[in-house]
Amino acid sequence: MLTHPQIDPVALQLGPLAVHWYGLTYLAAFGLFFWLARLRLRHQPFASLKGPQAWQPRDIEDILFLGVMGVILGGRIGYCLFYKPGYYAAHPLEVFAVWQGGMSFHGGLIGVALAEVWFAWSRHKPLLQVADFVAPCVPTGLAMGRLGNFINGELWGRVASADLPWGMVFRGAGELPRHPSQVYQFLGEGLLLFVVLWWYARRPRLPGQVSALFLMGYGMLRFVAEFFREPDAHLGLLSLGMSMGQWLCVPMVVAGAVVWRRASKP
């Protein structure tokens, strides 16, 4: 049985300014996206596009900025709507209290999707082409987010068997060993999904197939990981014994399957 190392969430203190590890993981996520997107320009069909349809480094900067806005706004609004709608309806000003925590991946995904729609419309690019460009660059950012969760000792897993070698005791979660579900998600939704998507996207695919694979891949990996992750205390398990995270993954997988089917039709 292991004990969570209880890492100080503040990475660096400069007078009154505190730099948190979680903030650094967000910066790392955005930096990785920018680096991978530059490499993505060498992949087909993007490397062979010419004229107004060609992708430029400036496009990466713009879509990264829009994506950051989508992640922050969508993630926060999604958390308020999906996880605590009653509370925030009664305390609307606390929607803006982001320093108190509370972000939703699925809300952030909706925010990023809207950012992609705006980018595609403003740059006269096919929406599925934009989505296919972005999708392989996202999982490393998700991995950084889970690393931040682990450093903070939050979003821990369910109680594990006492003989699980990597069972871990988290501060504030009692004395029983738990699954380090943040590590599971780091390895699954982060590293594994990145390897699969990056390998798949290196060759030309039908428009929509890469982004469809992301939707289905993340949705299924997150659905499985939720069996090891402690449900939100104020929600618990919902219908059919599924968590809110699992229910939000269902339409994600369905949407990915629909996009894949339509993309594969001759």
Image (tube, grey):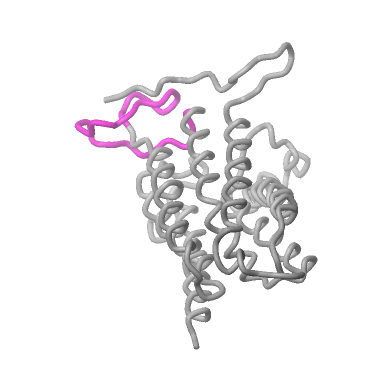
Q: Say which residue appears at 61% left-offset and 64% top-offset.
A: 47
| In magenta segment, residue 173 | yes
Where 188 falls versus 54 (above or below)?
above
Judging depth in this view, the residue of 138 and 184 nearest the camera is: 138
Q: Say which residue appears at 53% left-offset and 74% top-offset.
A: 259
Q: Please, which residue is most extreme toward the bottom here?
A: 266
Helix, strand or loop for the magenta stretch, by majority: loop
| In magenta segment, residue 218 | no
Q: Position of residue 143 (x, y in %)?
A: 49, 42
Tell whether 21 sits left or right of 55. left
Q: Say which residue appears at 31% left-offset and 29% top-offset.
A: 177
Q: Position of residue 90 (x, y in %)?
A: 73, 45
User: Dividing the picture into quarters, in which one does residue 169 lie?
Assistant: top left
Judging depth in this view, the residue of 64 and 79 nearest the camera is: 64
Tell whether 126 sits left or right of 232. right
Q: Say which residue appears at 62% left-offset and 48% top-offset.
A: 79
Q: Please, which residue is most extreme toward the top here?
A: 15
Q: Please, which residue is most extreme toward the left here?
A: 163
> Tag count in the figure?
0
Judging depth in this view, the residue of 197 and 45 nearest the camera is: 45
User: Dividing the picture into quarters, in which one does residue 124 lie?
Assistant: bottom right
Q: Which residues are magenta?
A: 153-177
